Amino acid sequence: MRKGILMVISGPAGAGKGTLGEMLLTRDGGFTFSISATTRAPRPTETDGVHYHFLSEEEFARMEEAGEFLETAEVHGHRYGTLLRPVMQMLDEGRDFLLDLDSQGAISVMSKLVDCVTVFILPPSFEELECRLRSRNTENEQEIQRRLRNARGEVEQLDRYRYVIINDNRDEAYQKLTAIVAAERQSTARYRPEIV
Amino acid sequence: MRKGILMVISGPAGAGKGTLGEMLLTRDGGFTFSISATTRAPRPTETDGVHYHFLSEEEFARMEEAGEFLETAEVHGHRYGTLLRPVMQMLDEGRDFLLDLDSQGAISVMSKLVDCVTVFILPPSFEELECRLRSRNTENEQEIQRRLRNARGEVEQLDRYRYVIINDNRDEAYQKLTAIVAAERQSTARYRPEIV
């Protein structure tokens, strides 16, 4: 049986990794969402174990201490993280899944699971990145400037990733992403067919 | 600029690596043939430096001694080999190229160029392999038995290759091969885009 692919997709905010990741999850039947753990309170529509694993600050800290997370991050004062055990179980069952992470999270996963398939999404230029961040209209000027500075630092790290895709045209970028998935499904690291 | 891909395709005789390799060379504009060196005499239609680099036994032996070959093989008493220098030059110029090699040649290339992209082509079964070898009608019974024995040994080595494709259906196998090429064109090992 084939082992599952753990695909880690990263890149600067505004490069389009979220959209490409969602396209993969929606269109490729083989991919499963990973359920994050978080310390933030559930919204009325959210179910524990479906949308998130909701944890108290204490539980989260204890599990982090015990090395149970593949990666953790802090966003707006709340902790988020991916639990290692369910990931390993899914991979052993041959299920592929995707983590859309910032640079720090991606590098943390690489250090813990060397066999993950890492893809860095690049914007065509910093000018275009700035344009995309502004057109979202969700961040203030200070935040946009912070994200642009971060982007330059993250792009410096792209050698750490196995693959890089310039997201100039969404459909072309998606095609490249699916080629990476198709190729990795033939990798002998996870797939050793037996013939008789 | 992107560095070229050196793709090494191997697998037992009858698995279909020759056909898949030819399809890639014909249909993918990016791939270049590699010109082998040989000690056999040129046929009337063959030109030195175009079809082969024709060498004397002494020249071949001297160059082999000097480490100028990426791999060598002996077929029907003649020596064949791939010269290292033109390969390195083509890769530096960003040209992709393909070597269709037996197991021994493939393993020799892997040991000399770690960045080569190795693909092992598997037949769907040994029974089907035997059937394909018989239908070629080019080998006698003894040769067919020898190739089948070799095939079992070669299949044991498939973990040494980066990718494996079961060639059950030619077009599906070709599609997998092109996905591997498309993915490797995004590999940061050979491609480090600079954005401004």
Image (cartoon, coloured by chain):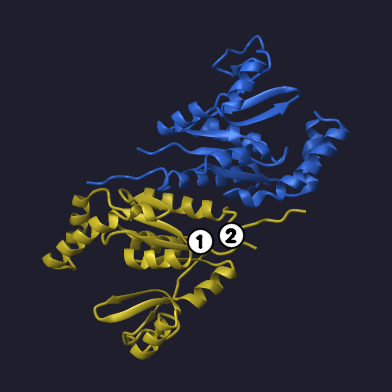
Chain colours: A yellow, B blue
In the depicted structure, whether residue B106 falls above or below residue B86: below
Residue B101 visible (yes or no): yes
Place of residue B16 in the rendered image (x, y in percent of width and height, measured from the top left)? 68, 38
Place of residue A167 in the rendered image (x, y in percent of width and height, measured from the top left)? 32, 51
Which residue is identified by label 1?
Answer: A115
Q: Which residue lies most toward the top here?
A: B44
Q: Specify the amino acid type for callout 1.
A: Asp
Residue at 41% of width from left, 52% of height from top?
A: A163
In the depicted structure, whether residue B4 falls above or below residue A80: above
Which numbered marker is on residue A190? 2
Residue B94 visible (yes or no): no
The picture quadrant where one finds residue B104 is top right
In the depicted structure, whether residue B51 falls above or below residue A104: above
Residue at 35% of width from left, 45% of height from top?
A: B192
Chain of the residue under the numbered disc 2 shown in the image = A
Of the residues under marks 2 and 1, which one precedes in the sequence? 1
Q: Residues within 10 Å of mark 1 (few under 14, many from 20)?
A: some
Helix or strand or loop: what does disc 1 sit on? loop
Q: Which residue lies most toward the right here?
A: B141
